[in-house]
Amino acid sequence: MNLALRDIRYHLGSFAFTTVGIGLLLMIVMGMGGIYRGLVDDATVLIDRIDADLWVVQRDTRGPFAEVSRLPAALEERLRAVPGVVASRRFVSHTIQREHAGRSLRMTVQGLAWPEDRGTWLPLIAGRTLDTAHFGLIADRSLGLDLGESLQLGRDRYTVVGITAGMISQAGDGMAFFTSNDAQAIQNDGDGESQRLERAARSARVGAADIGRIQPGLIERAGGSSGNVPVLAPPPVSAVLVWVAPGADPAQVARTIAGWGDASVYTSTEQRDLLLAGPVDKSRRQIGLFRGLLIAISAIIMALVIYTMTLDKVHDIALVKLMGARNRVIVGLILQQALLLGALGYAIAWLLGQRIFLLFPRRVLITGPDLLMLAGIVVGISVLASGLGIWKAMRVRAGEVLS
Amino acid sequence: MSQPIVEARNLRKVYGHDNTEMVALKGASFSVAGGEVVALLGPSGAGKSTLLSILGLVTAPTSGSVVISGTPVVDGARELGDMRAIRRQHIGFVFQKANLIPFLTAVENVQVAMEINDLPSREARRRSLELLDYLGVADRANHRPVELSGGQQQRIAIARALANKPGLILADEPTAALDGERGRQVMELFARVAHEQGAAVIVVTHDHRALDVFDRHLEMEDGELMGA
């Protein structure tokens, strides 16, 4: 006869209520783990998806995920000349927040080095890759944009040609992929007045210099589009990605690039580690500590619940002791109830989480290993929590039933 | 008369120390044989419950010994065996209140005592139902204690006390919560159990209306046993 189950059946209402409470608490523990995992996954998804061998960034910076990194776009060409390099591509990334369709739309703009990179590596769930040099974009579904929808960014209008899933930046914003030229145009877009003022200022600077007075045609050129001014460099890029030829030694290629005075180089793993140790680290630790606290609180609450349930049964425990019950009968009663409370609470946490986590603004990623680990923690908590009840039960005297 | 099931040898119990010392039992000696039903009488505070809890191996005597079925089990404060195992196998208890486990049905309350003594569940259930039938409450087998009358609850408690066929049944004022008629029925039940099953039954009681059902009366007063 299972005394634990019979006691629960008798007190079904209060047990169910307590279990739901424990379940909600465990759901928060589970959710915090999921938020942590989602944070890490979101932060590293781009690095993992791009899968470059090397990330070349501005000298002495930690790369575009950690801080501002600006490199001359021409570095892409220079890197192709390094022995062992099979491909190099610009990496342009910045975040914008605009009004669209009456709502605030915040997105991380990623530039693809079109035409070599059309986004074939992206996890498309609808539409296609970037087939044209301009005015197309692939948007993550978290941005809420539909296929074929167009949006005004700066002076140009862009049309959604593809939808991805799970492409979220470390800040939690959905990513939108443009050709790198479009991405830079969006980044450097200015209104007409400021461009006219900039051109007038350039003309004035050239006119004030000797060369301007000697060659008046330069003044006219300086007052035109910046693309027509040979001395003005094209807009900088955030990083340049490098793929090493099969058989070539990435470390040797990295050493060569590191010898240049204007760039630092990291492997993908190093860039990933820098990202996790940098911007993500504090959030990660904060969530980790909070999760630890929640686990401790869950353990205390479960211990109090089990202790209270034991107190309710002190008379019955004294009675079975008087009848000669061995300690294992009493320990089994309390331990089984604690484990059942933990197991049902865990199941409720999982079932509720499946629905509620979808409503969270940031991704809550519940992985199999995390679920297993939490299950182990719940078993541990249940055993620990039952310890308090067992301690109390062992101190109950059989004689109490006579008094 | 058969061999004694229980023997009390010069049992003495003292509570407290020095100035607060209170002697609850002053050298009680007696024995009860199998098939014998004995009434333990006396005013409140006479030491009846103390004597019963010492015989039930719940309280240790200050001195003296308890022998059950010819085996010494307690000698002063020294336990001469596994007290729980001895209680499980040799002693059945009935209390003033039935003290049934509220979350178990009537039959389960009896069954649990048998399972504690390692009887397989199916066999325990069969025998529990037989016992309930023997005590006339088989029709209440699947009811919880709250659904039973006081008399029915006390019969279930007696069935539980008989579950492991104990040699010794100790009852502490088992009819105190029952009216006269039901109280007498319970006392007659104890006599029947003692005579039919060969158990030694000791009943602490204030109820003088049913004393005729007992084979022997033991009087206690101020910690002393008289008429043993």
Image: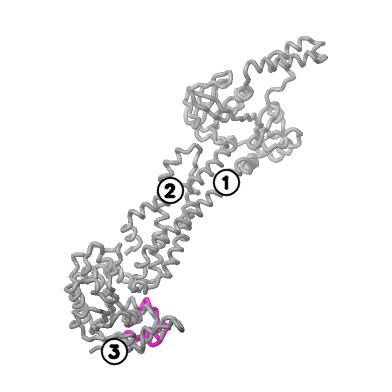
Q: Is disc 1 on the same chain as disc 2?
A: yes
Q: Residue at x 27, y 73 (%)?
A: B96
Q: Which residue is mark 2?
A: A24
The question of residue B73 being in magenta is answered with yes
> Which mark is in front, 2 or 3?
3
Q: Is residue A68 above or below residue B131?
A: above
Above or below: residue B211 compared with residue A41 = below
Count of marks placed on residues: 3
Category of crowding for the residue at label 1, using alpha-carbon neighbours closer than 10 angstroms: few (below 14), some (14–19), many (at least 20): few
Compared across the picture, whether B72 is left or right of A170 comes to: left
Q: Which residues are magenta?
A: B63-86
Question: In the rendered structure, the residue with mark 1 lies on which chain?
Answer: A
Circle 3: residue type: Met
Q: Dot 2 surroundings within 10 Å: few (below 14), some, or many (20 or more)?
A: some
Task: Check the picture and name the quadrant holding the N terminus of chain B.
Answer: bottom left
Q: Quadrant of residue B135?
A: bottom left
Q: Chain of mark 3?
A: B
Q: CA distance from mark 2 to mark 1?
A: 21 Å
Q: Is residue B36 magenta?
A: no
Q: Which mark is residue A286?
A: 1
In the image, is B185 to the left or to the right of A258?
A: left
In the image, what residue type sits under mark 1? Gln
Query: Given the image, on which type of amino acid does mark 2 rest?
Result: Leu
Image quadrant holding the C terminus of chain B, namely bottom left
Q: Nearer the viewer, residue B121 or B103?
A: B103
Q: Between residues A219 and A240, which one lies in front from this camera angle?
A: A219
Res B121 seen here? yes
Say which residue label 3 marks. B226
Q: CA distance from mark 2 to mark 3?
A: 65 Å
Percent x, y of residue A335: 41, 62
